[in-house]
Image: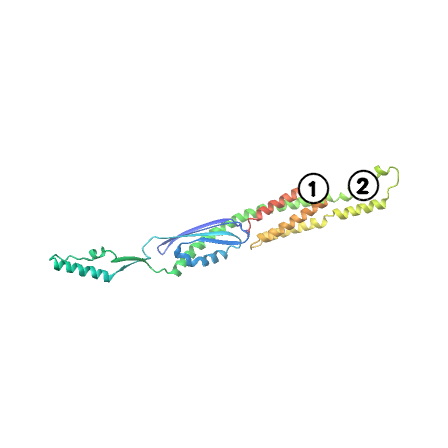
Amino acid sequence: MVLSMTGYGRAGALLHGRDIKVELRSVNARFFEYSSRLPRSCAFMEDKLKQLVASRVSRGKVELSLSLQTVTAADTVVTVNWQLAQGYRTALNAMSERMDLKNDVTVGMLARFPDVLTQTAAPTNEEELWQDVQSVAGQALDAFVAMRATEGEKLKEDVSGRLTTIEALVAQIEKDSAGRVQAYSEKLYARLQELLGDRNIDEARLVTEAAIFADKTAIDEETVRLHSHVGQYREILELNEPIGRKLDFLTQELNRESNTIGSKCQDVAITRLVVELKSEIEKIREQIQNIE
């Protein structure tokens, strides 16, 4: 499966009184790069989330964003300051006796005095919280990878089409170069006739020059390697693993062979084909920069 390095995934769920949302997004990068934005209460799971993402992503700059909102009071504890409450009650009783007033102290009255009741956050059950976040993050990761796969399939189709074009161009180069030695010999012979007139032309020297030309301009090895590289390219595109770096190396080899052909062949028609060939290779190179 070909995966793009760009992608986006989002998921959310209400679990144990908490509204949890996770977003993942990525762009191209040479290696795997990870960053995250987490609430302070979730700082302990930073490494766990990184490992979770790394288990599904090998290349790309990935950013994870986690939001956590409490929708119930489940994580809040209300405590009573019994000593302070007793102090208020004692003081109110004393006021009632000394001032000869009715003692109408109630719980509601005491609860309204400052600091009698306090609210504190309940101890976080880290394992439960991690399980909840992991569940949502897993869903976001599934959506994220699915999008990368969809984009990757489009990249694969484009690259495959350009490989077909490259094969056609190489075949045409082979066809056009097949008669180049004969054409060179005829051109050289005509030139010598023009220069020497009626004098005899050294046929042996003519054959030698043609042989030297053939050796200098032979592109059989390059075209064979180009066909081989294209075949390898197609095989790699079918692998179920990260292939971006392999394709990057193979693209360099395609470019190297096309440059060699261009430097060897001075024929205008072949030169034009080589320009088209290099253009297709460059377009492939741009596309595979997006492949994981």
The residue furthest front is: 98
Picture quarter containing residue 74?
Answer: bottom left
- Counting residues from the start of the chain, the first of labels 2 and 1 encountered is 2
Per the rendering, the mark at residue 271 is: 1
Q: Depth check: 72 or 116 in front?
A: 116
Per the rendering, the mark at residue 188 is: 2
Amino acid marked by disc 1: Thr
Q: Depth check: 172 or 113 in front?
A: 113
In the picture, measured across the screen, residue 118 lies left or right of residue 222, that is left
Amino acid marked by disc 2: Leu
Q: Is residue 179 visible?
A: no
**At which x and y percent is residue 41?**
39, 56
Query: Total number of numbered labels?
Result: 2
Per the rendering, the mark at residue 257 is: none
Which SS class for mark 2? helix
In the picture, measured across the screen, residue 59 lies left or right of residue 10, that is right
